[in-house]
Image (cartoon, grey):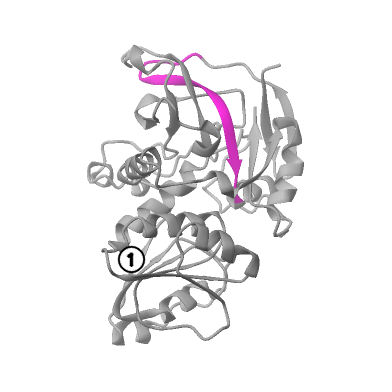
Amino acid sequence: MSSQVLIEAPGVHRVEEHTPRDPGPGEALVAVHAVGICGSDREVYQGNRPEGYVRYPLTPGHEWSGTVRAVGAGVPSTLVGRKVVGEGFRNCQVCDRCHAGETTLCTAGYEETGFTQPGAMATTLTLPARLLHPLPDDADLTAAALLEPAACIAAAALKAKAQPGERVAVVGTGTLGMFAVQFLKAISPVELLVVGTRNDREALSRQFGATDFRLKGQDLPDDFDVVIETAGSASAARTAASLLRRGGRLVLTGIPAAGADGLDPTDLVVRQLEVHTVFGAPPDAWAHTVRVFGAGLLDPLPLVTHELPLTEFPQAIELVGAGDPKVGKVLLRP
């Protein structure tokens, strides 16, 4: 049966019959292969998503991969049959930020697949074709379902502007942290440190290219050129900043709970640190991610630990929030 997850209100959901929506002008209908679950999906289900960043009732799912089954008027028919992933932000295309390529800052307001627009926890997904990124014909669609979080980290890597031979570090060892290691490894750093809270992530960090692994709380160096923070814990930003040399570059991607320890403005000024932040992924980050994935420099599959049917949505949500070190990325398969 064709089915979908529908969250009617926080904590209230059902799995119901899904009727594919025919693509209109400029749209494409995609058969969903797999959809990932992250902490923001858990927020949607529990009702913890900030106001304005979710709209109920909702079919969630913003991390996905699939195959184009049909296209609407104005979309090349050659797209039918292609393996694809897709951007989530539904930008207006006409404001100054969109014209600058900064679609995640669209001044028309926030709209995103899986949060305010129907997502991919369904058999099919219909969306603007301009958001799609075709994949190589031999692409592994299970691996490709993780390219959305990878694109967010690609945005961080592009902002960091790491150069070959620089000393780089990553704070955080979750999915985002492991992608950060892979993107930074690709630029040939002289050193790549990973800082985490779990010893069990050391082997995977080194598999992806880390040259050193330290636990938070251990003595840490303070002479890195670039640090990407992915942990989102209360003190992660300060830990990340402490790793930098004077004039170093910091990119923050984690979103801690309210009341987290902020960066010290005196420290930022005196050490002349360059600080960037990332929320979502603009088109250039998506294009970079797909290129790196197609070139075989990005390996998402070791991060996947569970694949479940849509009917086990609540179990999948619990797995994501359980804090079990054996749980990595959880995928649903429509």
- Quarter of the N terminus within the rendering: top right
The amino acid pointed to by label 1 is Pro
Per the image, label 1 sits on a secondary structure element best described as: loop
Does any portion of residue 117 appear in the rendered image? no
Question: Where residue 78 sits: x, y (%)?
Answer: 34, 14
Question: Where residue 306 sits: x, y (%)?
Answer: 68, 43
- Between 104 and 196, the one lying in front of the other is 196
* Residue at (35, 55) in percent of width and height: 186
Does any portion of residue 207 appear in the rendered image? yes
Question: Where residue 53 sits: x, y (%)?
Answer: 52, 47
- Between 164 and 100, the one lying in front of the other is 164
Q: Which stretch appears magenta?
A: 22-38
Q: Which residue is mark 1?
A: 189
Corner quadrant of residue 132: top left
Question: Where residue 242 sits: x, y (%)?
Answer: 43, 81
> Badge 1: how crowded within 10 Å, few (<14), some, or many (20+)?
some
Rendered view: 269 above or below 182: below
